[in-house]
Amino acid sequence: MTARMLPRSALIALVLLLNPSHVAAQLTTDNDAFQIRTSSDRGAAQVLLENLPPSGDLRAISIARGTWLRSERIIGPVVGSGFQSQPYHVERFAYANDTREVIAHFRARAADSSPVALRVVDRDGRVHCLANGTGGAGATCTARVAHREFFGRTVGAQFELLVEAEQRGVRSTSVTVEGFFHSGFPETSDLELTVDPIVRSDGTASMTLPINVRTYAPGNVLAQLIELRDRNVPLRRLVARTEWDGSSPAASLALLSDGTPTRAGTAHAGISTHRRLPFLVPANVDSVDISVYSYEAPEGAVHPRGTPNDLVLELHFLDGDPALARVDAVPPGRTPDIVIDAEAARAFPDTASERFTLRGAQLRPGRWFAVPVSKTGIPLNVAIILQFPTGRALEPADGHYFNPSRPGHGFYLAEAGGDWVLIWYTYDSTGSPVWYYAQGPRPSVNSGGAQWNAGLYRNIWNGSRTRFQFVGFVQLAMTGEGRLTFAHLVNGTLGIETMQRLGGPGCTQQWSNQPLDVGGLWYAPDKSGYGFSAEMIGGSEFFLAYAYDALGRPRWATAQQAFNAAVEAPLLQAKGFCPTCTATTITRDVIGRLERSISNAASPDGRPGFGLIGLEAQWAQGIPGGWSERRPVSLLSARASCQ
């Protein structure tokens, strides 16, 4: 589904290109604001930005986020230049003693499009923002308000802002004030969204707008203020509003919520039954604690808090079809493997939370589903937390991993400086190749070491350097002998699949009378941001080359042939299926060549390895541009050590 509506006066037009995970969505635009109504509480929308000026480093920054507020009053006209306003909204913020600030963004419009004035005032009467406007755009005001300091430090206290508006016309009419508040640390308030860094020749660029409203009940509208920048120079600001109709809760993996290794939670508001909450039980743990608790609703939520006593938690063991990565709902009517009635569970850590422990025969490794069911049928605000009290550290071998039931994509896992690095080569919604990057501390033997969680990023290229754009999370868990369960959350869409290592142990090739151990991640130090992963498989050499297209988007290609250090390997570009799409036949086009030379003393350890890499590629299948580089390389990761 594609929707288009051109704003009346904006320089930037918007087109919504929906992610396939959405059942339905609508886009409406109003000057520099647009609203998305969706059937999913989590996902992403592709927004096409039009009429952009030329840029080689376009950025989209989410400056502020909050619940959309709206009020309307009838006021009389104002005579003179004084601001004889009446408050239209009052909001209170309570903070600890820190350096937090408030970002307030509001707009005032008169029903008859006559002039209006708008200002943001704190409770001490200080004016932080003042604006005037007319017509459909009205007056727009954005203010950053920091806490007052006493004796050199910021003091947390009740803090309120008044958002005031008045009409300056000659007739009495209604004035609408709408907007939102955002609070947070100044240095972490801004979030970089995924956008093409290089504007196309026709003045367009694609932006991915994440949708995550699962902790807000249906009916609430969440908003964010987005600033488009050319490098760090502001171009224009947009307001995006998202509303969920409550019809289709998205799949959500509990252990991907907050990224901590020992504990993570999944919270959902306004649900009476949720059938798409999977969690993974690794094979190398002795027990799993499952806690259910209720929480106070975010401001504006319409559903009651409830208590765990209002819930029955069904646990279903469903390992899934290996040919499918999407997370389907637990079928209605299926008999649960375990039923937890909160009334029979033991309180932990307080009366708003209940805990149940799986161990022994109940603890089957693999994929489980938690299905919270409201006894009364009334939607509740519920969160589920998992903990692994004991376990053994996850210890997979470095190398390439793939799903034999879904061939054509996979990831390379390697150790680098005490961290694990994972590069996932897959496809976007059009079937074009795209790669993502994840890095995080290696799991340890303490609690939580049975699985690995890391943030997932999209590298983009602005012509001279890379920049990371956050797109989601990945998780690895060992759920069987030689099997890794790979969970990936990309722009709100969750997939889970079982992977196995490509190839086997042993270095079958010789160089300088010793095994040629070249398995690992290689990069060019004098032009960091691209490179390749390598592996010797039997008598063949296998490479994944990671580079970029003419718009700075990450692309990959493969090269495989019988080992021959003197012969260049052909580069193949694949067209496949998205991470949660049904697997289809992979097609490949020859797009260039990969050159590499072997040195007796490769960097950085002085052992035999690659000394140079050359990529000569011209992207196919409608992807613009190519990649042509020939540079000395160094090993980024540890060597695979012929595992």
Image (cartoon, grey):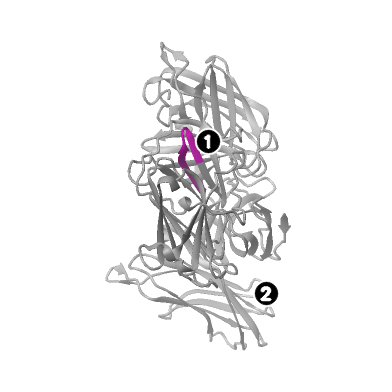
Residue 155 is a magenta residue: no
Q: Residue at x 53, y 36 (%)?
A: 499
Depth-wise, is mark 2 or mark 1 nearer the camera?
A: 1
Of marks 2 and 1, which one's residue comes earlier in the chain? 2
Inter-mark Cα distance, 2 to 1:
57 Å
At label 1, the amino acid type is: Met
Residue furthest to the left = 151
Give the labeled residue for mark 1.
499
In the figure, 325 relative to 379: above or below?
Answer: above
Of residue 245 and residue 11, the one placed in the foreground of this image is 245
Question: Which percent across, then down, holds residue 308?
Answer: 45, 66
Mainly helix, strand or loop, the magenta region? strand
From the top left corner, tell me how far across and down residue 144 is, in percent: 46, 67
169, 290: nearer the viewer: 290
Q: Residue at x 69, y 80 (%)?
A: 112
Circle on res. 244 = none
**Is residue 531 at least partly visible in the picture?**
no
Q: Label 1 near label 2: C-beta < 8 Å? A: no
643 with respect to 237 (left or right):
left
* Amino acid found under the numbered disc labelled 2: Gly
- Where are the magenta residues, as a range? 469-485
Where residue 538 appears, as percent x and y from the top left, is: 52, 18
Q: Secondary structure at mark 2?
A: loop
Can you say which quadrant of the picture contains the C terminus? top left
- Confirm whether residue 26 shows in the render: yes
In-front residue for pair 279/634: 279
The x, y position of residue 45, in whole percent, is: 63, 54
- SS for tag 1? strand
Q: Residues within 10 Å of mark 1 (few under 14, many from 20)?
A: many
Image height of 290 relative to 617, above or below: below
Query: Residue at image x 62%, y 56%?
Result: 332
Residue on which disc 2 sits: 135
